[in-house]
Image (spheres, rainbow, N blue to C red):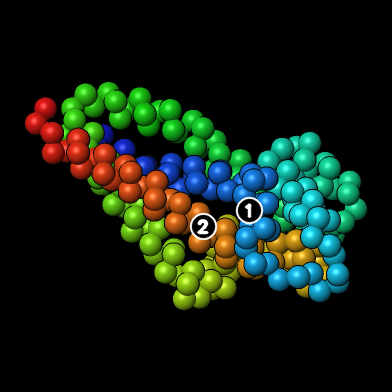
Amino acid sequence: MKRVILLSLFFPFLLVFLCVRLAFTEFFVELNYRFGNLPPDHWGMGYEERLNIAKLGLRSVLSDEGMREFINSGLFREKEIKHMQDVKKLLSVVFKVLYLGGPLWLILFFSLRNKRKMGLTLLLGATLTEIFVIFVLIFSLLNYDLLFEAFHNFFFDPYSWRFFDEDMLLRVYPMKFWYNATLWVSVFALILNSFFQALGFILWRSTS
């Protein structure tokens, strides 16, 4: 039973981290720009240029080569570069947990060798995930600015992520960009989670 509880507690992290990883792709950035109804740039930067710089920012937090390209572009202040380096460090931890923890979780899950225990694990894990994601979703709809600020103050220095309106990071990643991303990731997580919830129920109701 201890293993069931442990796997259930770790399940929300893996599922949410998986959805976050899928969001940090060029496809998702393009989707947000095309369908996210982002506000226009106040300084007249065109759609394609803005999108290309947004993709540059994405590459900077995914690889050392991307970060060098980001720094050498000359488009960002030192404070912006430092923040993206902080984001890169945070994501490296998140992705390591996903890449290493995911296979380990699956090994331990299948080692249960009991459909009811496997089903209970998925049911408990999916329920915890559902509670967390719905909380984030409701909080986002009610006061996304507060959620955004709380998240950044928790993971970063409170003064390291605040920028001027004319700074490039805010121009290519306006608040609406992150609002869309949070909502879309939350909805996708709920959809994916519902599959595991249903599977868990089926296994739990089995007689073996």
Q: CA distance from mark 2 to mark 1?
A: 11 Å
Rendered image quadrant of residue 148: bottom right
Say which residue appears at 77% left-offset and 40% top-offset. Answer: 66
Left or right: 136 as drawn, with respect to 22: left
Of tags 2 and 1, the one toward the viewer is 1
Q: Secondary structure at mark 1?
A: helix
**Residue 181's mark?**
none
Q: x%, y% of residue 146?
A: 54, 73
Q: Are marks 2 and 1 in contact (CB under 8 Å)?
A: yes
- Residue, disc 2: 184
Say which residue appears at 43% left-offset and 44% top-offset. Answer: 15
Position of residue 99 relative to residue 25, above or below, is above
- Residue, disc 1: 31
- On the question of residue 63 being in view, the answer is yes
- On the question of residue 85 being in view, the answer is no
Position of residue 191 relative to residue 8, above or below, is below
Circle nearer the N terminus (2, 1): 1
Left or right: 195 as drawn, with respect to 145: left
